Image: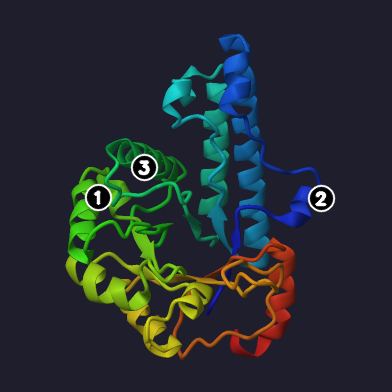
């Protein structure tokens, strides 16, 4: 059965006052370090509490959940030079990890993540690669800490995001840096097709990337619509589905926002998607979040049974 995925936040929970908090490095560095660490710790503890409540919300609604990439502001930022262990409420943060682990173990919620677009393993900029490896390893260790399996049932999704060189040069750079990741991270990492014409389509990912790396490919409906590269939707999604090594794939759905940019995501979706007889979970990348999922479930009711 196909399950819809909530991405990062619930607007219903936000209306109840449950929302993530951030902290910029400018604000952090302007305060005495002890005060800055206290504020940062409180915000991270809040974010973990909100994450736990959101997973509970997903359990109630049979959603998959993509955790926010903003749970841990500044923790992987070199200039801040701070770790979770430095925070004065570290014990309380550990308790929140335990709470999340308990919630997941007592539910059927599939938990995933999509680190920010600034993470580029194929970059020719070594500093950018080092930052990417730090970020990806940190989120994978977070997944370990909350009891998630180190496999594609809890995928960490990203893009290649690089066209600097031939396909083979880019893949070689990617794999060189991929091998630097912790094993638990490598075992979760999946790659998504891009929406820009000069980036990686499904056809390119299958032909060049997957055939060399064996890493699963995430199918994004809107990205493929924007950049089909001569491949029809049914063929593309079936090719991606076959790369998941027996794990249930997690794909992405959105529709274009009205206007001149077809890549911009809409608030709500209105067109029933095609499954082509396949089973997978589907992150709903829509601006109206859970409100959009509720509305779309009614539109797609006939294909979800």
Q: Is residue 285 above or below residue 123?
A: below
- Dot 3 and dot 1 residues touching (CB under 8 Å): no
> Seen in the image, is 80 located left or right of residue 231?
right
Quadrant of the rendering where the C terminus is positioned: bottom right
Q: Earlier in the sequence, mark 3 or mark 1?
A: 3
Q: Residue at x 81, y 50 (%)?
A: 15
Q: Is residue 159 visible?
A: yes
The residue carrying mark 3 is 132
> Seen in the image, is 11 located left or right of residue 106?
right
Mark 2 to mark 1 CA distance (whole Å): 40 Å
Q: Earlier in the sequence, mark 2 or mark 3?
A: 2
Return the x and y of residue 254 as percentages of the image width and height.
Answer: 59, 72
> Seen in the image, is 95 located left or right of residue 178?
right
Question: Could you say whether the residue bearing mark 2 is in a helix, strand or loop?
Answer: helix
The one of 213 and 130 positioned closer to us in this rendering: 130
Mark 2 to mark 3 CA distance (whole Å): 33 Å
Q: Is residue 82 visible?
A: no
Return the x and y of residue 192 as percentages of the image width and height.
Answer: 40, 65
The one of 145 and 222 positioned closer to us in this rendering: 222
Q: Residue at x 57, y 41 (%)?
A: 70
- Dot 2 and dot 3 residues touching (CB under 8 Å): no
Residue 15: which numbered mark, if any?
A: 2
Q: Is residue 192 above or below residue 145?
A: below
The residue carrying mark 1 is 178
Q: Earlier in the sequence, mark 2 or mark 1?
A: 2
């Amino acid at each position: 059965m196909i399950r819809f995925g909530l991405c990062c936040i619930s607007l219903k929970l936000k209306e109840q006052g449950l929302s993530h908090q951030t902290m910029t490095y400018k604000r952090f560095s302007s305060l005495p370090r002890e005060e800055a660490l206290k504020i940062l710790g409180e915000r991270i503890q809040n974010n973990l509490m909100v994450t736990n409540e959101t997973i509970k919300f997903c359990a109630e609604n049979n959603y998959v959940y993509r955790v926010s990439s903003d749970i841990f502001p500044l923790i992987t930022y070199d200039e801040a030079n701070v770790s979770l262990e430095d925070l004065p409420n570290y014990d309380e943060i550990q308790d929140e990890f335990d709470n999340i682990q308990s919630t997941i173990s007592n539910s059927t919620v599939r938990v995933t993540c999509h680190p920010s677009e600034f993470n580029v393993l194929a970059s020719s900029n070594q500093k950018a690669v080092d930052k990417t490896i730090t970020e990806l390893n940190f989120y994978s260790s977070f997944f370990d800490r909350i009891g998630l399996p180190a496999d594609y049932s809890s995928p960490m999704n990203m893009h290649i995001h690089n066209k600097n060189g031939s396909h083979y040069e880019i893949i070689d750079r990617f794999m060189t840096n991929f091998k630097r990741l912790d094993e638990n991270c490598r075992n979760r990492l999946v790659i998504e097709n891009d929406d820009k014409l000069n980036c990686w389509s499904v056809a390119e990912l299958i032909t060049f990337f997957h055939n060399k790396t064996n890493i699963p490919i995430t199918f994004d409906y809107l990205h493929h619509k924007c950049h089909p590269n001569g491949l029809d939707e049914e063929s593309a999604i079936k090719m991606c589905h076959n790369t998941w090594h027996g794990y249930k794939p997690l794909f992405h759905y959105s529709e274009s926002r009205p206007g001149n940019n077809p890549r911009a995501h809409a608030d709500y979706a209105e067109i029933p998607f095609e499954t082509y007889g396949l089973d997978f979970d589907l992150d709903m990348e829509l601006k109206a979040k859970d409100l959009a999922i509720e509305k779309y479930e009614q539109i797609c009711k006939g294909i979800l049974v």
